[in-house]
Amino acid sequence: MTPTLVITVITLYFGLLILISYFTSKGATNETFFTGNRQSPWYLVAFGMIGASLSGVTFISIPGQVGNNEFYYFQIVLGYILGYAVISYVLLPLYYKLNLISIYTFLGDRYGKVTYKLGSFIFLISQLMGASLRLFLAAGVLQIAIFDSMGVPFIVTVIITIALIWLYTYKAGIKTIVWTDTLQTLFMLLALVFTIYIIKDELGFGFSEMVGQIRDSELSSVFYWDWKESNNFFKQFLAGAFIAICMTGLDQNMMQKNLTCKNLHEAQKNVTWFSWILIPVNLLFLGLGALLYMYLAEKGIVQLGDFVFDPEKGRYLNTDDLFPQLAIHHFPVFAGIMFLLGITAAAFSSADSALTSLTTAFCIDFLNIEKRPVHSQKRTRLQVHIAFSFIMALVIIVFDALNDRSVISAVFTIAGYTYGPLLGLFSFGMFTKYKVQDKWVPLILFSPFITYLFNNYSAEWLWGYKFGFEIIILNGLITFSILWLLHKFYSR
């Protein structure tokens, strides 16, 4: 694909997003930006959340990781179902009962002002890191497809990428995002299906033969039972459940969309349908991964960009380069176009809502924007929106300098350390009536450091046991235990 063709496709795509923004931002107010006036149809939110949940991380990292981890990721996906059930029947009723805009307001009601600010601050750090890593993928693809050949440095690509998001979200916020996410999810799923179809033809498979080849492939193992290893089924299943609870149910970004539904019943229908749709969609991504490695073997390709097999480590390195390099430099032009649309849609559908939720949490939780004069609210929100755009760009640039791993591993690892304290705070607050002095609650920040020690030395301390993504559960338990000890101290 030529840079001119890529620029044309991207320009048309963002022109469509800006057109949607134009229509959805008419008459927009601060309430529109933060809550969408609570008028979003549940089915629209559910469909759009597919793209926001999967993001560019799933689109690129999951297929690439199949070469090293086979289909073990699906064990996490099965755990999502349990996690989303908890969100639907435990968390959503609480949020709607309290009529929340920022879900961390609950922490203020339960513990006090210090904990309220602390919970929101933890979210800001978590979301900023996670969203930046997701957007890092999209910027990297644009760099490969367009800007490398033009000699444009990566930092400029990052700035352009974030500026495009800011352009279509700064007016109507979450109301625009509900609609743009729907469009972007559609593009992502179409790109996935068309790419599978094109690779099938390139390999000379019929549909049933393709399914058989994937099923019989050595890469298609789903379940892993060794209890010591991080890929163990029970570890992955529980990790999936708690990742869903934390990264959706305790996440202002994802919950802000659910809270734009008209009522609790519609929000619950949204989460239930969305969770079950994730199963076949993730299976398609894993199947795509198997096909990509079959394509490599068929064409005799041994290296793509930084993607290469390391015989000493016995694994593939830089697997996030596999899909982009094949799509842009080896597949037919139409497949490359579909890939660009897919990764752009997947990455931006999560990054745009992240930027909006960061703005919402900071404005509501730290600036008390709703108590300010009406004429200054819009200006304040705009300034915060711009500030977080710059911070996100900085995080992406730093990660680019340090990155040597799959982005999805980085996202889940960071989530294990940052969302664990939120898990402990919410569970202690919801399932106990114990009192804790608000000023001592920041002591829970020791929990990630204790978790880090356990993660590093678990094989020595726990008879060979290795933590995987279930580290988030340990972090939550340690936080819960610290709060219980603070309660015992407070009750003396």
Image: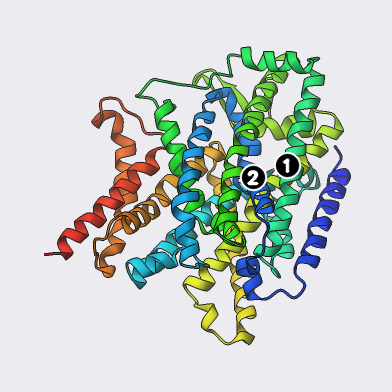
- Say which amino acid is labelled 2: Ile
Q: Position of residue 373 (x, y in %)?
A: 58, 87
The extreme front residue here reads 265
Q: Quadrant of residue 466?
A: top left
* CB within 8 Å, label 1 to label 2: yes
Q: Position of residue 334 (x, y in %)?
A: 86, 34
Q: Where 56 sits versus 169, above or below?
A: above
Q: Quadrant of residue 61?
A: top right
Q: Where 196 sits versus 428, above or below?
A: above
Q: Residue at x 58, y 52 (%)?
A: 132
Mark seen at residue 439: none
Q: Residues within 10 Å of mark 2 (few under 14, many from 20)?
A: many
Q: Position of residue 289 (x, y in %)?
A: 65, 26
Give the residue number, with chain letter if any, for mark 1: 188
Q: Residue at x 68, y 57 (%)?
A: 41
Q: Secondary structure at mark 2?
A: helix
Q: Where 317 sits versus 348, above or below?
A: above
- Say which amino acid is labelled 1: Met
Asked whether residue 248 is in view, the answer is yes
In this view, the mark in front (1 or 2): 2
Give the residue number, with chain letter if any, for mark 2: 50
Q: Residues within 10 Å of mark 1 (few under 14, many from 20)?
A: many
The N terminus: image quadrant = top right
Q: Residue at x 41, y 36 (%)?
A: 238
Left or right side of 73 for 389: right
Asked whether residue 143 is in view, the answer is no
Q: CA distance from mark 1 to mark 2?
A: 9 Å
Q: Secondary structure at mark 1?
A: helix
